[in-house]
Image (spheres, helix red, strand yellow):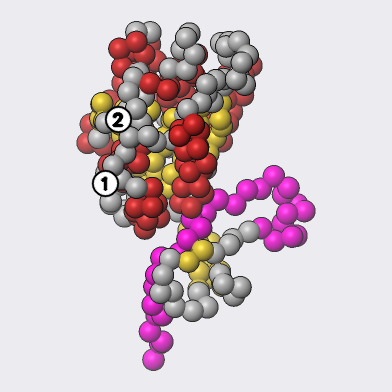
Amino acid sequence: MAGKPVKILSVKPDQQPHRIVILLDSSGSMFGDAMGHKWKMARFVAAHIARANLPNTSLALLVFSEKVNEQIDFSQGNSAVVRRLLEIEADTDFAKKQVRGETALWDVLLIALQWLRDPGYVNSVYIITDGGDNKSRNRLRHVRDDLVSSGVRLYFTLLSSERPMQDEQFGQTEVADLAEASGGLVLGPLGGQPFGRPSYNPTKDELRGVAIGLNELYSVMTRNDLIEIELPQTLKKWSKWSLGVSSEQKALHKNWLVVYPQELAPCVAAPSSP
């Protein structure tokens, strides 16, 4: 932090229950090619978390395009979310009727954050999308400030586009930056083929690989640690800091990845003990 060391006082598992708001993008770009192969992958991903039975976790759901099209809040229970996601997976006509319109990702993300104001939980938003926003009224800077100050972690499964729209493709970079700032992760892009190649249905081996990646993402969502730190100075504004693995631990654990919120909120010095 500004070239000064941050003292780590303690590290312990976070035993608080988890809450996750699932955002399923049903805008027109999610259909993909003429055969709708991208939406088939989206259905697979959405149904996968429905079947995952995540431990100590409550789920809510927002299906959106340029507005919220469907919503199931926490009061309705996990069974309502699971049932609806499996219904969408089984509904082969859903895409023809419902996958349309532009993408108001930032606006809908702010709605999800309003559902996650209770500090007694580890709160996350999980978004299944092809990335980007071309309809929101809220600016990205406002969304970023609200996200980082809320302590909510942001996770994405990104789907590839055979024919990406320029504004939404640029948005994939933005969503990756948002996830990183919040201490979340991005899986993907998944599926699809480079522009100009024929479309195809993913094979069983490819879906098996996607499932492995999804399970690893869920593990990061639901297994967290609390780190108590001591700062070298008072923070008058939001400040970036770095947390990494020591060189000794890197040699032992070459595949370790440290995921953490990368900005610290303004704070004042604690009063000295008498």
Q: Nearer the viewer, mark 1 or mark 2?
A: 2
Q: Which residues are magenta?
A: 245-274
Residue 260 location, x and y as percent? 52, 54
Q: Which mark is residue 66?
A: 2
Q: Earlier in the sequence, mark 1 or mark 2?
A: 2
Residue 115 location, x and y as percent? 27, 44
Residue 21 shows in this picture? no
The residue positioned 38% from the left and 8% from the top of the image is 92
Q: Which mark is residue 75?
A: none
Residue 158 inside the magenta-drawn segment: no
The residue positioned 43% from the left and 22% from the top of the image is 30
The quarter of the picture where residue 126 lies is top left
Assess disc 2: are there few (<14), some (14-19) or many (≥20) residues with their C-alpha within 10 Å of its C-alpha.
many
Decide: marks 1, 2 in contact (CB < 8 A)? no
Residue 194 location, x and y as percent? 62, 21
* Left or right: residue 51 compared with residue 104: right
The residue positioned 57% from the left and 11% from the top of the image is 199
Residue 90 shows in this picture? yes
Quadrant containing the N terminus is: bottom right
Residue closest to the eye, 91 or 189: 189
Does dot 2 land on a helix, a strand or a loop?
Answer: loop
Residue 22 location, x and y as percent? 37, 34
Assess disc 1: are there few (<14), some (14-19) or many (≥20) residues with their C-alpha within 10 Å of its C-alpha.
few
Q: What amino acid is found at the position of numbered circle 2 in the picture?
A: Glu
Residue 271 inside the magenta-drawn segment: yes
Residue at the disc numbered 1: 114
